[in-house]
Image (tube, rainbow, N blue to C red):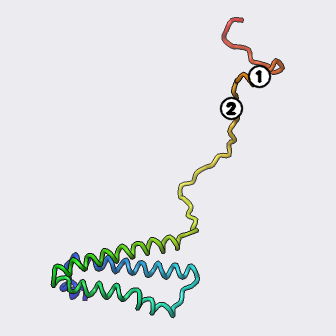
């Protein structure tokens, strides 16, 4: 079957078609996962979604891919539409992935140690603050003649 399809399509058209179909499938899977996570997935709405949201993209791309060998303009149209659909589904995948992973706490494999060291206040010798009082013992200078 694959060799039959490959006989009708140029290699670059086939690779582009496979890529776009893979993105459509990935978007579909992310959509199902997001709806399962939100608790609003319904099997009864799935056929309608496939009919209205997936089949037009897939069918249109397949028709253009099959006729892209016949005419250079159709091939250019195929790649333009494929690029547009790719951008749309990439944006949808990013949006659904962010919805799916929102609030997910991922712990880093690298652990960091947080020390609870309180900084000591710096001692400043200004004119407003007196120096060491005479009641406090001071250390005798070392290494000098007294």
Q: Is residue 75 left or right of residue 102?
A: left
Check disc 2: other Cα within 10 Å, few if <14, some if 14-19, many if 20+: few
Image coordinates of residue 52 in percent, x first then y, are 41, 89
The tag on residue 130 is 1
Q: Dot 1, crowdedness within 10 Å: few (<14), some or many (≥20)? A: few
Q: Which residue is denoted by mark 2 in the rendering?
A: 122
Residue 59, percent from left and from top:
31, 88
Residue 16 placement, left or right of 7: right
Viewport quadrant of the N terminus: bottom left
Between 146 and 29, the residue placed more toward the observer is 29
Question: Percent x, y for residue 70?
Answer: 15, 85
Give me the residue at 17% from left, 83% from top: 69
In terms of secondary structure, where does tag 1 sit?
loop
**Earlier sequence position, callout 2 versus callout 1:** 2
Q: Is residue 98 above or below residue 5?
A: above
Q: Nearer the viewer, mark 2 or mark 1?
A: 1
């Amino acid at each position: 079957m694959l060799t039959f399809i490959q006989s009708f399509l140029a290699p670059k058209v086939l690779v582009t078609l496979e890529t776009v179909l893979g993105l459509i499938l990935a978007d579909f899977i992310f959509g199902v996962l997001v709806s399962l996570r939100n608790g609003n997935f319904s099997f009864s709405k799935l056929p309608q979604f496939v009919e209205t949201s997936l089949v037009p993209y897939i069918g249109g791309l397949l028709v253009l891919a099959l006729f892209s060998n016949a005419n250079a303009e159709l091939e250019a149209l195929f790649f333009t539409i494929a690029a547009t659909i790719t951008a749309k589904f990439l944006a949808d995948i990013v949006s659904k992935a962010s919805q799916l992973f929102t609030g997910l706490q991922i712990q880093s494999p690298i652990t960091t140690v947080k020390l609870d060291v309180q900084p000591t206040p710096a001692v400043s010798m200004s004119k407003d603050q007196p120096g060491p009082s005479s009641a406090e013992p001071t250390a005798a200078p070392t290494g000098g003649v007294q």
